[in-house]
Amino acid sequence: MDSSIYVTSPAVALPQSTSGQSSESPSMTELLRQILETQREQLAFMKGQAANQDAGARWRAFLGRWDQDFPGVGQHCKEVLPIIERAYLRLIQELTERLREDADGLDSDFALAEFLDRYGMRLGQLGGILSQLGPLADAAAGESPS
């Protein structure tokens, strides 16, 4: 679930009076220094915000935290993902071929129940597995094989 965060840029604080100058006329160097500092703060904030919104970084951190207990699990996900993808697509192909051959085959309650029994649970479960393995496999893409 993503949500937008709107941030306004911080106001530049005028410098306190320095020796030899009134607070009404700050030196150009001091103003430029403050602008530069504000831009650095904004850059650090934006980098942090970008890192928080990077799902891949979160999954890489997750794999990194558990690397000692589950070594190579990300790489293993990467290796088995094509197998699950093929099984998922094979099931979708079978489902669509059946519906194309018998377009009126889901008109009765019995036919619909049989169709859902045959495809519904398996399709939902394979989709769930794909949605879990995919991000882990993507996060492991930068890792070297174990």
Image (tube, grey):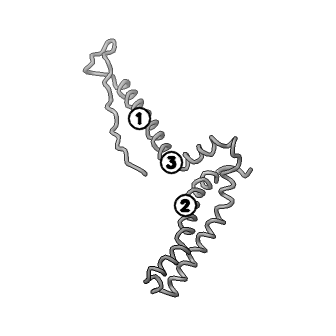
Looking at the rendered structure, the kind of residue marked 2 is Gly
Nearer to us: label 1 or label 2:
2
* Sequence order check, earlier mark of 1 and 3: 1
Residue 39 bears which disc, if any? 1
Residue drawn at 59 percent across, 69 percent down:
88
Most foreground residue, 26 or 15: 15
Residue 128 bears which disc, if any? 2
Residue drawn at 43 percent across, 33 percent down:
41
Residue drawn at 44 percent across, 40 percent down:
46
Most foreground residue, 121 or 81: 121
* Sequence order check, earlier mark of 1 and 2: 1
Disc 1 packing (10 Å; few <14; some 14–19; many ≥20)? some
User: Is 10 located above or below residue 19 in the figure?
Assistant: below
Across and down, in percent, residue 12 comes to 33, 29
Looking at the rendered structure, the kind of residue marked 1 is Gln
- Which residue in the structure is indicated by mark 3? 54
* Sequence order check, earlier mark of 2 and 3: 3
Looking at the rendered structure, the kind of residue marked 3 is Asp
Cα distance, mark 1 to mark 2? 43 Å
Q: Is residue 6 left or right of residue 48?
A: left
Disc 2 packing (10 Å; few <14; some 14–19; many ≥20)? few
> What is the number of callouts on the image?
3
Q: Are dots 1 and 2 in contact, CB under 8 Å?
A: no
Q: Residue furthest right?
A: 146
Q: Residue furthest left?
A: 24
User: Regarding mark 3 in the picture, which secondary structure is present there?
Assistant: loop
